[in-house]
């Protein structure tokens, strides 16, 4: 592991974020950033920012690291606790149901080849 970046409580559902994370897992960091630049999924800008952060973390923690040799070693999405984004929808006969707003923890770990 060269560097790691985590976005906690990202305002995107885990199901949508996993589609984009599966695109970049195992790719070179530069190639992944270029791919995310032109991906029209809603999770692409969020993941692009995380990978840029991980590259910056690699540059700071080990200055001698080859930035062209970095690749997305591990990337995964976990469901975050949804305590703040509670919404209610009125239903029949005076009842109400909860509307689930998705929040995610997105983790990216870069390695070196």
Image (cartoon, helix red, strand yellow):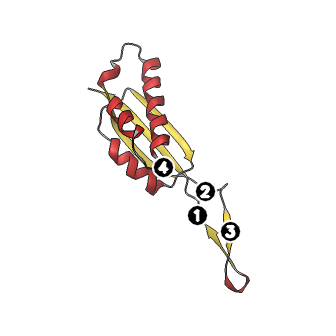
Residue 96 against residue 21 in the figure, above or below: below
**Residue annotated with mark 4:** 42
**What numbered label is drawn on residue 80?**
none
Q: Nearer the viewer, mark 4 or mark 1?
A: 4
**What numbered label is drawn on residue 88?**
3
**Residue annotated with mark 1:** 100
Q: In terms of sequence position, does the residue under pointer 1 or pointer 3 come before the other?
A: 3
Callouts 4 and 1 close, C-beta under 8 Å = no
Q: Position of residue 13 (x, y in %)?
A: 51, 55
Element type at mark 4: loop
**What numbered label is drawn on residue 82?**
2
Q: Calculate the distance from the C-alpha at mark 3 to the C-alpha at mark 2.
A: 13 Å
Residue 66 against residue 92 in the figure, above or below: above
Q: Calculate the distance from the C-alpha at mark 2 to the C-alpha at mark 4.
A: 19 Å
Task: Looking at the picture, tell me which residue is in the foreground, 20 or 7.
Answer: 20
Element type at mark 3: strand
Q: Calculate the distance from the C-alpha at mark 1 to the C-alpha at mark 3.
A: 9 Å
Q: Calculate the distance from the C-alpha at mark 3 to the C-alpha at mark 4.
A: 24 Å
Classify mark 3: residues with Cα within 10 Å, few (<14), some (14-19) or many (20+): few
User: Looking at the rendering, in which quadrant would you find the C terminus?
Assistant: top left
Q: In terms of sequence position, does the residue under pointer 3 or pointer 2 come before the other?
A: 2
Residue pushed farthest bottom? 93
């Amino acid at each position: 592991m060269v560097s790691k970046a985590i976005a906690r409580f990202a305002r995107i559902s885990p199901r949508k974020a996993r589609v984009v994370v599966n695109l970049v897992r195992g790719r070179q960091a530069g190639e992944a950033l270029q791919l995310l630049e032109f991906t029209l999924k809603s999770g692409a800008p969020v993941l692009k920012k995380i990978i840029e952060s991980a590259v910056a973390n690699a540059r700071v923690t080990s200055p001698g690291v080859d930035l062209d040799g970095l690749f997305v070693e591990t990337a995964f999405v976990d469901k975050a606790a949804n305590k703040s984004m509670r919404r209610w929808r009125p239903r029949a006969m005076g009842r109400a149901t909860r509307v689930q707003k998705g929040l995610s923890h997105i983790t990216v770990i870069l390695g070196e080849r």
